[in-house]
């Protein structure tokens, strides 16, 4: 429990440090501005506010070239004796090694748009005062407290790590209860000496206190050494708080299990308890109250592990394609514009159109084929809206195996109002329906352009996998999970638009940019205008993302998710094994005499233990059929929705051979463990019975 609490606290605080700047009392999000104040004026006003209120205030900005690995903190120190003020000289005490933080004086921020995130290091009242100060400067802001205890508790409860907590809690209940029940004879002797329930509980806790003191000291020493080497004991107080809360909850769970199991031993008379007999009925019920949730958790984790393993393998297979993309980058837009997106669309969309006309970008926008139009029902699939440069970079073959080439530069003027629709042969029967949806693909087109739009329908060879430069996690598609890696799109419908054509609206360019669908093969084509602040790009473009780095980060996250799920599965299986052995212990101690008598009378093993075998057989059947039946019900619900003309919220669920193998493995572990333990106890009962006679 102590080791797990420390590990879980480490993972949680590390993730928190990668998302937020630790140590703040409040986070302020500035999302609106009347543009009456420049960025430099706002920075000077914040510096003055910091000095007047003696609190530190910092503006967070991602690094332009490495937004996922480096962030910049522009700090107004306020109180020179505060911890935050020391960061200007000593650096930010990062808990995680995955994200670095450079700290600068706020005067170095320059003419940056004031929209974004600010942190206040001081009293909570200072944050409210800063919001009022920003309002006087024409800025709309809201305050939140992500590091407050209540917010941290909610964040932890919604984290995937919390499932690990419940698995370990279940294991703690199982092992604690088993250890107490296995000491039934010792408790019976103490009861014979006149000890009460409270006497025995206090005795146990005194004995445990010695062990816990030693264990806590060893774990604390190991944690301090590890954290000292990992991050120099940064944010040790926050780490200790989270670890203590987790350990405290687990201790309470274990204490409750200990007291409940001890109370069960008092249900048996002293003389019967001296023979090792247990309260069979209550113990059986208690054991299965733990065993059944463990079965469900193990089944759920087994399915998640198989899926996570597939995600890892898919991302590994796609690494070669990203390596071929070289230094290509996408852009990350400033997300602090609130509901006023018109300036972003106008400035960014206009700039991207110019870059497209100059052949500086690759357009690879995504649409869900089924949701392209509400008037036409289309099959499941993906549509890629691409430019001619995309075809120059990525091979797409026609029915004869010939590659589609981009339209020559001197022929584009005549084709400015036409697009090429490339449909895979497998979707040929839907060609007319797909063609009819093309005007809707581009959103709010100019009416004249919409009427004169020409669509040339072509066919592509089926079975092709087209590289899309992104995993598709930022592109909404009901047919896929956000964790799926859709970098290689199988048999996509391609809509090829002339470079820089007004067929793609400013809004479309901007939307594709937010979905990693605008790619700059040469980073200088975006970094140079960004550094020169052409088109006021620094106001709207926060950073650039190397597509290869994005893929590597996605692979790392997928591997971490797989490891966590695999740990949960192992812990859940351990609970299954422990409870299975516990069931056999309770059964053998309760029915030892009957088992021996039936054995010497010639009864078969299965007849002697038919009750346990029947219960475990039902549990195994439940384990084997739960997922297939659940999947069948989900697919039936989908059929009902589609029959009524309602778009399916997710695709039909398929059970793979890997899923069936995982289910079969769990069934084998669940039933065979009980069968093996039952055989061992059966032989022991027979051996002891023969020795007594």
Image: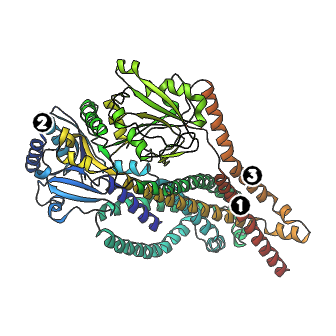
Q: Taking 469 as reference, is 333 left or right?
A: left
Specify whether residue 134 is in view: yes
Q: Position of residue 16 (x, y in %)?
A: 34, 55
Mark 1–mark 3 distance (CA, rounded to whole Å): 13 Å
Mark 3–mark 2 distance (CA, rounded to whole Å): 69 Å
At x 61%, y 38%, the residue is 652
Q: Position of residue 396 (x, y in %)?
A: 49, 43
Query: Vertically, is 320 above or below 393?
Result: below
- Residue 634 versus residue 577: which sits nearer the camera? 634
Q: Quadrant of residue 511?
A: top left
In this figure, which residue is indicated by the disc labeled 1? 668
In this figure, which residue is indicated by the disc labeled 2? 137
Q: Which mark is residue 618?
A: 3
Which of the two labelled residues, at mark 1 and mark 3, occupies the earlier sequence position? 3
Pick the quarter of the image with the C terminus. bottom right
- Residue 626 versus residue 72: which sits nearer the camera? 72
- Residue 352 versus residue 644: which sits nearer the camera? 352
Q: Which mark is residue 225?
A: none
At x 46%, y 26%, the residue is 455
Label 1 secondary element: helix
């Amino acid at each position: 429990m102590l080791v797990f609490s420390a590990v879980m606290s480490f993972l949680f605080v590390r993730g928190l440090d990668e998302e937020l700047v630790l140590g703040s009392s409040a986070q302020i999000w500035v999302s609106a501005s009347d543009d009456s104040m420049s960025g430099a004026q706002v920075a000077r006003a914040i510096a003055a506010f910091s000095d007047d209120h003696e609190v530190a205030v910092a503006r967070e900005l991602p690094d332009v070239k490495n937004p996922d690995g480096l962030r910049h903190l522009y700090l107004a120190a306020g109180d020179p004796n505060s911890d935050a003020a020391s960061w200007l000289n000593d650096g930010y005490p990062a808990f995680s090694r995955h994200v670095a933080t450079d700290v600068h004086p706020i005067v170095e921020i320059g003419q940056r748009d004031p929209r974004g995130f600010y942190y206040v290091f001081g009293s909570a009242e200072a944050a409210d005062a800063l919001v009022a100060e920003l309002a006087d400067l024409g800025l709309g802001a809201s305050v939140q407290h992500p590091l407050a205890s209540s917010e941290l508790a909610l964040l932890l409860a919604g984290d995937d790590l919390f499932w690990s907590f419940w698995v370990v809690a279940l294991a703690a209940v199982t092992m604690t209860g088993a250890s107490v029940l296995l000491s039934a004879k010792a408790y019976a002797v103490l009861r014979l000496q006149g000890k009460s329930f409270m006497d025995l509980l206090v005795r146990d806790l005194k004995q445990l206190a010695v062990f816990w003191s030693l264990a806590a000291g060893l774990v604390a020493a190991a944690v301090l050494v590890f954290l000292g080497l990992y991050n120099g004991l940064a944010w040790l107080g926050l780490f200790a708080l989270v670890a203590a809360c987790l350990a405290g909850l687990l201790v309470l769970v274990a204490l409750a299990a200990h007291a409940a199991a001890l109370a069960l031993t008092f249900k048996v008379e002293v003389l019967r308890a001296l023979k090792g007999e247990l309260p069979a009925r209550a113990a059986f019920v208690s054991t299965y109250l733990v065993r059944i949730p463990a079965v469900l958790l193990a089944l759920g984790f087994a399915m998640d592990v198989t899926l996570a393993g597939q995600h890892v393998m898919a991302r590994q297979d796609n690494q070669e394609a990203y390596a071929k993309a070289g230094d290509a980058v996408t852009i990350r837009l400033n997300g602090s514009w609130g509901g006023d997106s018109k300036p972003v669309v106008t400035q960014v969309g206009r700039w991207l159109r110019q870059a497209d006309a100059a052949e500086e970008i690759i357009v690879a926008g995504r649409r869900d084929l089924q949701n392209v139009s509400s008037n036409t029902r289309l099959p499941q699939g993906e549509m890629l809206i691409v430019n001619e440069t995309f075809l120059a970079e990525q091979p797409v073959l026609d029915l004869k195996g010939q590659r589609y080439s981009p339209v020559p530069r001197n022929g584009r003027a005549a084709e400015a109002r036409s697009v090429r629709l490339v449909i895979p042969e497998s979707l040929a029967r839907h060609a007319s329906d797909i063609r009819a949806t093309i005007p809707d693909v581009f959103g709010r087109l100019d009416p004249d352009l919409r009427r004169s739009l020409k669509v040339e329908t072509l066919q592509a060879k089926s079975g092709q996998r087209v590289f899309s430069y992104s995993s598709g996690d930022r592109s909404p598609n009901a047919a896929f999970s956000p964790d799926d890696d859709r970098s290689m799109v199988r048999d996509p419908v391609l809509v090829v638009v002339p470079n820089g054509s007004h067929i793609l609206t400013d809004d479309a360019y901007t939307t594709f940019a937010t979905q990693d669908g605008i790619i700059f093969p040469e980073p200088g084509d975006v970094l140079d205008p960004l550094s020169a602040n052409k088109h006021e790009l620094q106001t709207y473009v926060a950073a650039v993302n190397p597509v290869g780095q994005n893929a590597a980060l996605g692979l790392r996250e997928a591997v971490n998710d797989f490891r966590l799920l695999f740990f949960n599965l192992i812990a859940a299986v351990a609970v299954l094994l422990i409870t299975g052995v516990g069931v056999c212990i309770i059964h053998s101690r309760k029915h030892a005499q009957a088992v021996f008598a039936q054995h010497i009378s010639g009864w078969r093993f299965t007849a002697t233990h038919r009750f346990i075998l029947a219960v475990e057989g039902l549990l195994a059947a439940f384990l084997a059929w739960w997922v297939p039946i659940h999947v069948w019900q989900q697919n039936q619900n989908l059929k009902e929705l589609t029959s009524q003309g309602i778009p399916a919220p997710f695709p039909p669920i398929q059970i793979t051979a890997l899923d069936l193998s995982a289910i079969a493995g769990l069934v084998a572990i669940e039933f065979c463990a009980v069968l093996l333990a039952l055989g061992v106890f059966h032989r022991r009962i027979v051996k002891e019975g023969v020795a007594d006679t």
